[in-house]
């Protein structure tokens, strides 16, 4: 902790100065680092260590800095995409939160603070994961009175708009539970666009939107653009039309800032390939032409030599009920050279793994090409990657580009480190792990084996095996995803216990894999259901596949008791009695799952997923939820970013970077709203 304060003071003293004292970057030790920022509602806010930042060259530091600025400029875009009034509501809430005229000890104020913190987490007024609208714990009267006490010029009023007019629009959106209750409606019997709160469409019915895009599609086009990816579809004067996200178009004020920083980044790119990537992205932001977007994506896949890499722009389509329109996100990162050695070793031995896999020979690839995945550390998160962030990313999304040019797959090491460190001291493992022997195993090997499992899953698992001739790759339909994720997970689990792991230097000894087996089974059979409301089924693909694998093996184990659920003092635990037998069953399941995939056996896939992957045993679920609740832990995690300060000499030449980890959650968001808010009314 002392070390962190020292770094912060250095930054404060020298910020803005031309100084050769700049650039003294270092990474705090895990033991000294303060991972937990705060916890509220159902979320815990963490910090992440930007490990290894001191190993970047001066030029890389400069590039990193410009990219982090570009990452922060898109925050408002996401708020607006998530709901038409989100930016206005955020401004109103922040105005009351920061007001000197309100009683900060009142229950209403405290409830408003909580509500605002949740809005910051979700980039809007709907829960970031569940999608339901937050219920304000403060009264409408308190909100209106507090706003009225503020100078009018501090309020986000439109041209000629009165306070009462603004309230007439905003209050129902916030306080009436029947107005846009869901961010994204997924119920099949409703118009998905008219019943969803997200702002990708305006005044357009689902049928109109589908007709609009179907008319554009050419079924003979083998290289189709991602139709509608970067635009808002609206009906104006009776005509359905796109508002394209670009400089000079929709979100121009934000995209101009993004382009400004990208141009600076392009000037200090590490190599020509990376410069071309950045320039293509700039070109796309200016034109909005989706052909250019595809050129950019292909160029980005080809940039494997650079140390620094990034995502910046409209990427994932989870927020659109029709799955076409992308939300804005950014992740700035650099390769963890030491950890990436793991993935290189794995990829170099890809053929050996394929040849020795426990699947039928006819489904093995004669020549397997390992995907070169890399391990990265995040340096800045923005848009839809902030403050909740993924553990791994695999892009681009366009199918034809993936087939023709491949994809890049990353594991985010420092995010996974923060997750695992945040569990320490919570009593979670002590509550759910069977005994001291298992606890010690997890303490020693869990982090290592978790990461290795992710590497095996991504580098080899998905790429292994082949379809029988003539089998349609989409034959498993909605069961395809959990079957495929099971396959990749099983591949990793099976090999984790192979002596080759020690031979290749990937694991320190032949006991280490047991930590992965124990934690995987504890998670799959019990603790992952802490994220699911009582009475509900498992919906999320990875959660389905984890339960599928573990409950299938549990059932197999009824004959040999290799793994059992055992009671002690009225509590249920996972006990693994024979790790070798567990491995054997995992191999048998991999054999069967590969057969299902390779032959496109839909009925078998359906039976497997429905029987093992979806339903939760209610008595056990209740018990797990009660035990979890007693620990007072939060099921979701979010992050604060570090602050980077650049240093320049009198000629404007970059001389170094400093990093400060001490900013707290509310301060960060208020600063972002002040300094990185190109779309709000000022
Ligand atoms: Zn996967």
Image (spheres, rainbow, N blue to C red):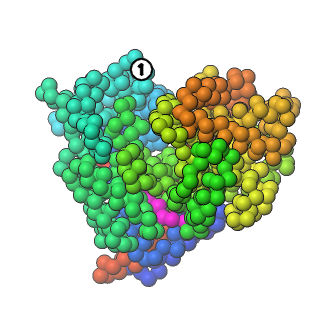
Question: Residue at position x 41%, y 50% from top?
Answer: 402
- Image-based side of 171 in relation to 49, left or right: left
Quick one: 439 or 455, which is closer to the camera? Answer: 455
Q: Is residue 109 above or below residue 187?
A: below
The reply to whether residue 18 is visible in this rendering is yes
Q: Quadrant of the N terminus?
A: bottom right
Quick one: 152 or 623, which is closer to the camera? Answer: 623
Query: At which x and y percent is residue 528?
Result: 65, 37
Q: Is residue 265 above or below residue 103?
A: below
Q: Residue furthest left?
A: 237
Question: Residue at position x 35%, y 56% from top?
Answer: 298
- Image-based side of 277 in relation to 567, left or right: left
What predominant SS class does the magenta segment belong to? Answer: strand
Query: At which x and y percent is residue 680?
Result: 28, 45
Q: Residue furthest top?
A: 189
Query: At which x and y percent is residue 668?
Result: 45, 53
Instruction: Verify whether residue 329 appears in magenta.
Output: yes
Instruction: Verify whether residue 259 appears in magenta.
Output: no
Question: Residue at position x 41%, y 20% from top?
Answer: 188
The reply to whether residue 34 is visible in this rendering is no
Provide the residue designation for mark 1. Answer: 188
Judged from the image, the secondary structure of the residue bearing numbered disc 1 is loop
Quick one: 510 or 50, which is closer to the camera? Answer: 510
Number of other residues with Cα within 10 Å of mark 1, as a class: few under 14, some 14 to 19, many 20 or more: few
Question: Residue at position x 53%, y 41% from top?
Answer: 467
Q: Looking at the rendering, which quadrant does residue 122 occupy?
A: top left
**Magenta range:** 328-336
Q: Looking at the rendering, which quadrant does residue 44 occupy?
A: top right
Q: Is mark 1 within 8 Å of ligand 1?
A: no
Query: At which x and y percent is residue 479?
Result: 53, 31
Q: Is residue 636 above or below residue 475?
A: below
């Amino acid at each position: 902790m002392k070390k962190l304060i020292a770094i912060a003071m250095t930054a404060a003293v020298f910020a803005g100065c031309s100084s050769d004292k700049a650039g003294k970057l270092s990474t705090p030790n895990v033991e000294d680092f303060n991972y937990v920022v705060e916890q509220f509602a159902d979320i815990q806010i963490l910090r992440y260590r930007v490990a290894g930042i001191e190993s970047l060259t001066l030029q890389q530091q400069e590039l990193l800095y410009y990219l982090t600025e570009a990452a922060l400029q898109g925050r408002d875009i996401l708020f607006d995409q998530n709901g038409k009034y989100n930016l206005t509501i955020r401004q109103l809430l922040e105005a009351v939160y920061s007001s000197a005229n309100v009683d900060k000890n009142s229950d209403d104020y405290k409830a408003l603070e909580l509500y605002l913190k949740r809005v910051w987490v979700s980039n809007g007024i709907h829960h970031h994961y569940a999608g339901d609208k937050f219920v304000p714990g403060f009264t409408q009267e308190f909100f209106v009175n507090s706003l009225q006490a503020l100078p009018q010029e501090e309020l986000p009023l439109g041209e000629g708009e009165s306070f009462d007019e603004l309230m007439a629009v905003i209050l129902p959106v916030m306080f009436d539970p029947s107005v846009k209750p869901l961010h994204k409606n997924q119920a099949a019997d409703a118009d998905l666009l008219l019943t969803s709160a997200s702002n990708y469409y305006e005044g357009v019915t689902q049928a109109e939107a589908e007709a609009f895009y179907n008319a554009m599609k050419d079924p003979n086009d083998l290289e189709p653009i991602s139709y509608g990816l970067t635009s808002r579809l609206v009906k104006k004067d009776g005509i359905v039309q796109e508002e394209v996200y670009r400089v000079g178009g929709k979100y121009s004020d934000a995209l101009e800032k993004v382009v400004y920083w990208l141009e600076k980044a392009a000037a200090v790119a590490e190599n020509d390939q990376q410069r071309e990537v950045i320039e293509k992205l700039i070109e796309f932001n200016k034109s909005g032409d989706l052909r250019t977007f595809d050129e950019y994506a292909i160029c980005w896949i080809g940039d494997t030599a650079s140390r620094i890499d990034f995502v910046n722009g409209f990427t994932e389509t989870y927020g659109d009920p029709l799955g076409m329109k992308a939300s804005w996100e950014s992740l700035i990162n650099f390769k963890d050279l030491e950890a990436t050695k793991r993935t290189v070793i794995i990829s170099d031995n890809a053929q050996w793994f394929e040849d020795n896999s426990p699947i039928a020979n006819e489904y093995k690839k004669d020549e397997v090409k390992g995907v070169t995945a890399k391990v990265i550390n995040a340096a800045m998160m923005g848009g839809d990657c902030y403050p909740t962030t993924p553990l791994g990313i695999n892009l681009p999304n366009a199918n034809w580009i993936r087939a023709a040019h491949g994809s890049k797959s990353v594991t985010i090491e420092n995010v996974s480190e923060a997750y695992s460190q945040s569990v320490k001291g919570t009593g979670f493992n002590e509550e759910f792990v069977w005994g001291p022997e298992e606890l010690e195993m997890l303490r020693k090997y869990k982090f290592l084996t978790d990461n290795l499992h992710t590497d095996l899953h991504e580098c080899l698992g998905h790429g292994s095996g082949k379809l029988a001739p003539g089998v349609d790759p989409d034959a498993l339909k909605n069961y395809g995803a959990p079957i495929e994720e099971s396959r990749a997970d099983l591949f990793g689990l099976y090999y984790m216990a192979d002596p080759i792991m020690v031979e290749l230097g990937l694991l320190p000894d032949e006991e280490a894999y047991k930590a992965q087996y124990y934690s995987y089974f504890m998670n799959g059979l019990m603790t992952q259901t802490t994220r699911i409301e009582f009475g509900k089924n498992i919906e999320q693909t990875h959660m389905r596949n984890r339960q599928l694998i573990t409950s299938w093996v549990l059932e197999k184990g009824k004959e040999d008791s290799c793994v059992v659920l055992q009671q002690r003092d009225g509590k249920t635990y996972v006990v693994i009695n024979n790790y070798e037998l567990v491995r054997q069953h995992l191999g048998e399941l991999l054999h069967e799952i590969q057969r299902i995939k390779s032959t496109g056996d839909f009925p078998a896939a359906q039976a497997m997923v429905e029987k093992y992957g979806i339903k939760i045993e209610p008595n056990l679920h209740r018990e797990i939820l009660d035990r979890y609740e007693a620990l007072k832990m939060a099921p979701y995690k979010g992050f604060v970013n570090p602050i980077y300060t650049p240093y320049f000499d009198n000629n404007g030449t970059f001389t170094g970077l400093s990093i400060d980890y001490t900013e707290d959650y509310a301060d960060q968001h208020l600063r972002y709203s002040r300094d990185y808010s190109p779309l709000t009314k000022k």
